[in-house]
Image: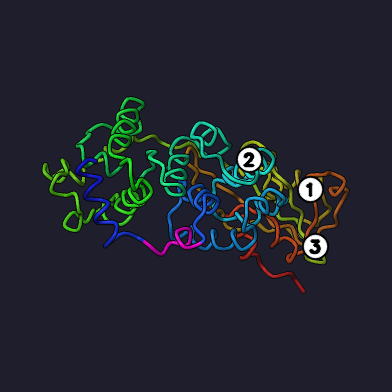
Amino acid sequence: MSRLSEDLLAWQIRSGRHDLPWQCPPRSAYRIWIAEVMLQQTQVATVIPYFQRFLAMWPTLFDLASADEDAVLALWSGLGYYRRARYLHATARICADQCDGDLPRDFDALAALPGIGRSTAGAILAQAWDLPFAILDGNVKRVLTRYHGIAVWPGSATVTRQLWQLAEEHTPSQHAGRYAQAIMDLGATVCTPRRPRCTDCPVAHHCSARGQGREAQLPVQAPRKSLPVRHIHWLLLRDATGRMLFQQRPADGLWPRLWSLPEAPHSPDQHAALFADFDEADRQALPALRHAFTHFTLDVHPVLFQGVRPRAACAIPTMAWHSPSDAAKLALPAPVRRLLTHLPEMPR
């Protein structure tokens, strides 16, 4: 057992997190798997209420496997990175059909399932069954980079291989689950991206970054790139009864299979006229909104058309008119849901 793992195991008992909902009985691979997928690129505080609602709706893998995908996406709405929800649903169906309703304990089989991969598979195997498999999420990368003083961007292929080797060397053959939780806890609560609390760190006395006074400089940041900006019009077509037109997005691309608003890259009036008749006086440009993605920024220019007279859009399978109460139940992207909550009232 390495000095790092020995120190972290002792620290986790007295100072780690012990009351996260996926840690509480009944502890299971299913609950850990749901949590680990939700925690990909998302903070614990954001995940907890989603996890609790998810488990209340689908308490077992069989329940999730039999669920409708649209219902899964609707519950996921607002959590972001929606492919995670689709992969969860797909994996649940595979495991229900092929693994008797449980996740496989074989690493290769588990890592090959949709949306899991190497680190998530290691986290499940370690935390559910205490098997000695390494993890390498963002928190672990930061801890290992500082502890070993790696002064190269950790996102490069060479450094990633080095970090995986270190992660495996530090993973103990016993208490692997508690060690996995310990190193994630350390990264989340002590060895934070900004202003790390080195005076509270159980491994600071052997940390290279701390010894060199470089904890603020490590990990090395990724090379900065200017993100492209995309512009789009969202069409808010609202009829006299308050119904609005929604369109389900394709299975691939941005917000896959979620329900959104009809889009127009330009000429919003011309595009809106494909679906409804309206009077020019009932057209209102709403304040623009910006939504940042990993690889680009989306600038949205919403246009509200009041009191429209629908055409045959409902004949298109991916388009439907919904009342406000029905729309609230749809799987909507977070910016669409926010926009709908701030719409002007219907004219009397």
- Residue 54 percent across, percent down from the top left: 59, 58
* Spatial CA span between label 3 and label 1: 18 Å
Image height of 53 relative to 314, above or below: below
Decide which of tag 3 and tag 1 comes sooner along the chain: 3
Q: Hey, what amino acid is under mark 1?
A: Met
Residue tagged 3: 307
Q: Using a 10 Å C-alpha cutoff, classify the residue at mark 2 as few (fewer than 14 neighbours), some (14 to 19) or many (20 or more).
A: few
Q: Quadrant of the C terminus?
A: bottom right
Instruction: List the single residue furthest toward the top.
Output: 158
Q: Residue at x 46, y 49 (%)?
A: 128
Residue bounds of the magenta highlight: 18-25
Instruction: List the single residue furthest toward the front.
Output: 174
Instruction: List the single residue furthest toward the bottom.
Output: 348
Image height of 157 relative to 205, above or below: above
Q: Say which element carries label 3.
A: strand
Q: How is the image coloured?
A: rainbow
Q: From the viewer's perspective, is 245 left or right of 74? A: right
Q: Residue at x 61, y 63 (%)?
A: 56
Q: Nearer the viewer, mark 3 or mark 1?
A: 1
Residue tagged 2: 99
Most prominent secondary structure in the magenta stretch?
A: loop
Residue tagged 1: 319
